Amino acid sequence: MNTTFILFFSFFALMAIGVPIAVSLGGSAILAILVGLKVPLIITAQTMFNGINSFPLMAIPFFILAGNMMCNGGISKRLIAFVNLFFSRFTGGLAMVSIGASMIFAAISGSCPATTAAIGGIMVDEMEKNGYDKAFTGATVAAAGTVGQVIPPSIPMVTYSVLAGTSISTLFLCGVGPGIVMGISMMVVAYLYAKKNKVPKVKLKVTPAIFFKTLLHSSWALMMPVIILGGIYSGIFTPTEAGAVSAVYGLIVGMFVYRDLKPKDVPKVVFDSAVASAVIMLIMACVQTFCYVLTREQIPQMISTALLSLTQNKYVMLLIFNIIVLIAGCFLQSSAAIALLTPILLPVMTAVGINPYTVGIVFIVNMGIGMVTPPVGNCLYVACNITNLKFEAIVKAIVPYLIALFIALMLVTYVEPISMFLIR
């Protein structure tokens, strides 16, 4: 018990004073090992190495690099032009375009903040010009970014699959349905807002010539998710190899097809990708040491016994799981929350008969919603930077989207075919 107290007290104390999550995890684990367990400190190096010594984890830096290549390669405006052909004519059409373009971009970037930045950087001004309130515009692009890690490929899905011992490619399939449900729920909010506030429709004449010209210009961007997912499910390459292929494809399209990615930009893109990958890998390494202490102290078994003593009804357990993960998503980054909670909560969920893939996709959707819930919501801060609005204004405007996303979360949680229909 003394070791457990040292572990959690030091972890929350470090978090409270603003120490990065990876250092908080590693530092508290080292302190618990030295003072509580009193085992040789070399165990820290061993567990950290084992935490990242995984071939599937190599997919993370590749997908991050591919997403950054495409973000800087000018694909967002092509995707927006393509989606505009279908949604702009409806009530709330431009907001729907933002959401639809984000859904497609999510199949390229695998990141919520990147999706918000890429689509929001273009759509915010367009929506404002057409009568949308500035705060609602910022809330729209922030909420639309939540699908960034739900629709495959997804970096948090890779993290969960490695920790849970599940198939990455299968979990990728599970994300398609929930991503679509989230997108539709947000489009309903956009429609109701535009109808209530009498936002004028965009008059766009789409001729066959315009349609095929726009399709041709956006085809290179649209082909990326087809190449990634098609290659994986046809057996041509593994998810890790798909990440490498997508990075090369993103470089070729950005530099030689769209030509928005200049040679001078490549070093910065690579550097930014390396930093983002290093942050996730350091979290994965440190959380392994943290989990070593948890295992030695039998904390997962204690939590499992406590939860199972409350109920063994899987529907109630799913509700408890959602509450825990939603709270965690308000304060922790996706990779940190998944790495920390998966070893603790997954055994409890499987013990009451819940499919580990269902657990995974509900986890990922919760983390997506966490991107637009204060105080940590990264998509909110990105939207604030784009719109030059205060954080409080965006938070107030995003409430209708949060309600819609919570409804989508409940549907994904309790209507299993939404995430499992492609597998079955």
Image: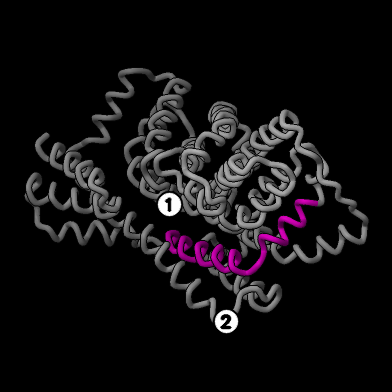
In this rendering, which labeled residue sits more in front, label 1 or label 2? 2
* Front in this rendered view, residue 192 or 269: 192
User: Closer to the N terminus: mark 1 or mark 2?
Assistant: 1
Indicate the position of residue 55 as horizontal and vertical percent values. Answer: 42, 63
Q: Is residue 142 left or right of residue 52?
A: right
Q: Position of residue 41 (x, y in %)?
A: 12, 58
Element marked by disc 2: helix
State the predominant SS element of the stretch in magenta. helix
Query: Looking at the rendering, in which quadrant would you find the C terminus?
Result: top right
Cα gap from disc 1 to disc 2, whole angstroms: 31 Å
Instruction: Using the rendered view, name the quadrant where residue 49 is placed.
Output: bottom left
- Residue at position x 36%, y 48% in the image: 336
Q: Is residue 57 magenta?
A: yes
Q: Quadrant of residue 6?
A: top left
The x and y percentages for residue 271 are 44, 72
Task: Say which mark, if any, is on residue 397.
Answer: none
The magenta stretch spans residue 401: no
Q: Secondary structure at mark 1?
A: helix
Stretch of the chain drawn in magenta: 55-84
Give the residue displayed 23% in from the left and 53% down from the top. 26
How many badges with numbers are in the image? Answer: 2
Q: Name the residue carrying label 2.
A: 263
Please name the residue shown 61% across and 74% down the image.
261
- Give the residue displayed 65% in from the left and 58% down from the top: 225
The residue sitting at the bottom extreme is 263
Which of the 4 quarters of the picture holds residue 73?
bottom right
Q: Amino acid at mark 1?
A: Thr
Residues 278 and 204: in front is 204
Q: Position of residue 174 (x, y in %)?
A: 58, 42
- Residue 159's mark? 1
Instruction: Please name whichever residue, 398 or 388, is drawn nearer the observer in this view of the structure.
Output: 388
